[in-house]
Amino acid sequence: MNKITKRAIIAGGLIAGLSAGFLVLAGHYYVNVAIRRGKKKYSNEKRRHESMEHKSKQMIRSMFATHKEMLEESKALMDDIKKEEKYITASDGIRLYGELFKQENSHKYVIIVHGYNCHLEDMYCYLADFYKKGFNVLFVDQRAHGKSGGEYIGMGWLERLDIKKWCEHISYLDPDASIVLFGQSMGAASVMMACGEKLPGNVKVCIEDSGYTSVGGMYRTLMKESYHIPSFPLLNVADLVARHKAGYSFLNADSCEQLKKSSIPTLFIHAEGDSFVPFENVRILFDSANEPKELYTVPEAEHVCACFYDRDTYFKKIFDFTDRYIN
């Protein structure tokens, strides 16, 4: 072997080693940005702003006004309702936090689950409509959010077992409970994935709003749109890092596969103008689910804004659906 060949082999080895090292570092960085508590998270602001520029000013003003109205109604109710702070322990020992607003003489419950990088207070605006319909309302902080413990976000996969624990907790407190799961965005993934587990028979309905088909699929979209890079091989390396650090695989966390195992009636909601979770996700989710199921789409609204686009229709769809399965 001559000197030139030896040098080429050594250089090739160094380049391969540096490339592998860079990928490992990039994988750790990606996991920290995507799912580690307290780290800078993905922002949808740029895409949302660009999306809003193509929507009518009248519609935008109307959505903001509706959100404000719902929040004011809910906060007015909170002044008259005793809030019960709840702490339970997840299957892996993490402490989970929730807030229960009780209804007298009602066995109907809704568990309201927030999205990525949010907390339960962001969902307060939904209290009034559910409470006035006779539901006991439980808001939960997902792991690694708000007052719940945990170092890493599970993007719905780890949280599916947390939702199961909340359902078991309610069923223990009220054996006659009829439970509705309601989640938005990552919260929607959490409740859909939970439905693929063995839940208490008290769980009667699942409502998902703006959920995604899988964690891997969501990250492929984000890598393309946010970083303008191909997902392979970075996503595969990040997946290995997530398995080690967070205890789950990005590539195995799949809402569709969980829905295929579920017999819980599910209502799917999605805005056609969603700039974060592409609209086609809901078609795939709906096709994956077993009957009974129903699909409600909203023409223009932004991500998790379907309710603010048309509040009356939104809750009519929800309550028409829940009334079929809850006495």
Image (tube, helix red, strand yellow):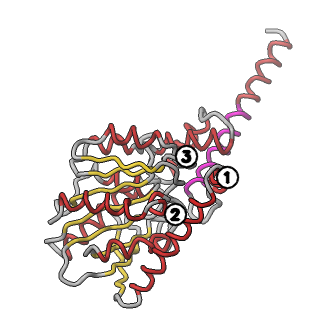
Q: Are marks 1 and 2 in contact (CB under 8 Å)?
A: no
Q: Which mark is residue 241?
A: 3
Residue shown at 71%/28% (left/top)? 16
Residue furthest out toward the front: 58
> Residue under circle 1?
53
Of marks 3 and 1, which one's residue comes earlier in the chain?
Answer: 1
**Can you give x and y, in whole percent of width and height, for residue 77 in the image?**
39, 85
Q: Mark 1 or mark 2: which is in front?
A: 1
Q: Secondary structure at mark 1?
A: loop
Q: Secondary structure at mark 3?
A: helix
- Give the CA separation, mark 3 to mark 1: 38 Å
- Give the CA separation, mark 2 to mark 3: 14 Å
Q: Name the residue type under label 2.
A: Glu
**Can you give x and y, in whole percent of width and height, for residue 274 in the image?**
53, 49
Q: Nearer the viewer, residue 28 or 324?
A: 324
Tag 3: Cα neighbours inside 10 Å, few (<14), some, or many (≥20)? Answer: many
Of marks 1 and 2, which one's residue comes earlier in the chain?
Answer: 1
Q: Name the residue type under label 1.
A: Glu
> Residue under circle 2?
151
Residue furthest out toward the top: 1
Verify whether residue 154 appears in magenta: no
Q: Which residues are magenta?
A: 17-35
Q: Quadrant of residue 323?
A: bottom left
Q: Mark 3 or mark 1: which is in front?
A: 1
